[in-house]
Image (tube, rainbow, N blue to C red):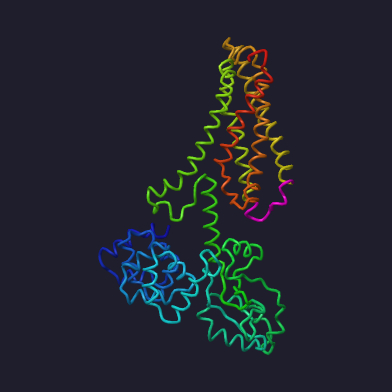
Amino acid sequence: MVGRILQPEIKNLIDSRNFGALREVFSDWPPADVAEVILDMPEHEQVIIFRVLPHDLAADVFEYLEVDAQQQLLRGMAQEQVVGILNEMSPDDRTALLEELPSAAARQLLQLLTPDERRTAQALLGYPEGSVGRLMTPDFIAVHADWTVKEVLDYVRENGQDSETLNVIYVVDERGKLIDDLRIREFLLKPLETKVRDLIDENYVSLSVVDPERDAVAVFRKYDRTALPVTDSNGVLVGMVTIDDMLDVAEEEATEDIQKFGGMQALEEPYLKLPLMGVVRKRAPWLAVLLLGEMLTATAMAYYQTEIAKALVLTVFLPMIISSGGNSGSQASTLIIRAMALGEVTLRDWWRVMRREFQAGLLLGVMLGCIGACRVAMWAIIGQQYFHQDVYGSHWALVALTVGVALIGVVLWGSLSGSMLPFALRRFGLDPATSSAPFVATLVDVTGVIIYFTLALIFLRGTML
């Protein structure tokens, strides 16, 4: 937003090559706002803006940019500037950049790092992809239990500049094993001569370097933390993960789940940056599967073609009935998948969920069934009294009954199948998000046809059939 508002003024400064004024404009801006402006500008102007930024500001701004923009800027910078930026980046943000690059390009950038930074980068890249080890930073403050509060505060003043956050201070033993995590306020509110051991209770929460990112998000949410320590298999403190990284992971996970809800594979790149054939490949498999499912609907209708030929009026209400079932199934599926993601529902709760959805589906079905039956009755009565036409034939009351009961059955079945399918997928180790709305709707379409015409045979036999 900020970039679009000021874009004309910024472009004028670039066109007039007034780089001093351009530098002055951004000198007092927060790095996040400068990054927003850069992302809103054309690619050739992004490099120009970035080059005029003060060195310290440029390093901070670079971390706020998307990986694609970072790569674009690196290609346009002189090697000296690349070296400065890479060595100034926080280890976790640098890892996010390097893991997105081709291996050859990543190796070239690693050679530009100082020996210490290179060892740190290689260590983080050595952890499994998608693990907490890739997200963590080794820049943290660790103290010992025999220190005093004064010694801790002096240490923080001397070494805190490079720490990712000063909100949390970690206590370790002589081997580096984590003992406790303490908030900085606990040191600020205690007398200076107080020993650290008098503050610790060893009641802390930590992550393992090999924990999946998704699990880490759940831990942050559960314990409401802004930072968590990361330990290796021996309990040695090796890093920390902060809430800003978790927010990015949570957004990626939510985006992936939403895309799966739509009946497609998750996109690894932003939509507009993905090649056309890439979009097609992501969408085609599920569309093909759903088409095969809809073919079963056609097969079911073909089975009842004799009944359809005798009572064409039944086909008028078919879209309404099966779409109602699909909608109820999609609602139930979405509710359960989200509840699973938030930890509100587990596999053990399947029976409670089924009972609840049976009751909800029955009530919803009765409500929609009454609406559907009333609609048939109203149109039939209006047609007879005002237009002297039998809109639905002389047995319109039976048609209304069929439509009403069919809606009850289809909506009830949709609610049950939509809520139980995520449990079945989770039970077999699959992602419940794949039971997306289109998939559930297709399943209910097939069974909805069977339910509808079976009820029609029961209620209309001897009259219209």
Q: Relative to 148, is 44 above or below?
A: above
Location of residue 403 by image quarter: top right
Question: Whole-percent x and y of residue 21?
Answer: 32, 70
Side of 48 relative to 382 (left or right)? left
User: Where is residue 461 drawn, in percent x and y?
Assistant: 67, 16
The answer to whether 266 is drawn above or below residue 124 in the figure is above
Q: Which segment did they paint magenta?
A: 339-351
The answer to which image quadrant residue 17 occupies is bottom left
The N terminus lies in quadrant: bottom left
In what quadrant of the picture does the C terminus appear? top right
Question: In the rendered view, does 108 fall on the left or right side of 440?
Answer: left
Residue drawn 53% across the image and 28% down it: 298
Locate residue 383, reporting x and y percent. Answer: 59, 14
Q: Main secondary structure of the magenta part?
A: helix
Q: Does the magenta segment cover residue 292? A: no
At 52% from the left and 39% from the top, the residue drawn is 290
From this view, report whether residue 355 is shown above or below residue 56.
Answer: above
Q: How many marks?
A: 0
Q: Looking at the image, which residue is at 56% across and 47% down?
A: 434
Residue at 52 percent across and 45 percent down: it is 262
Q: Residue furthest top?
A: 388
Measured as percent of width and height from the top left, residue 4 is found at 38, 57
Vertical relation: 193 (above or below) 447: below
Seen from the viewer's position, the closer of residues 245 and 269 is: 269
Left or right position of 182 against 164: right
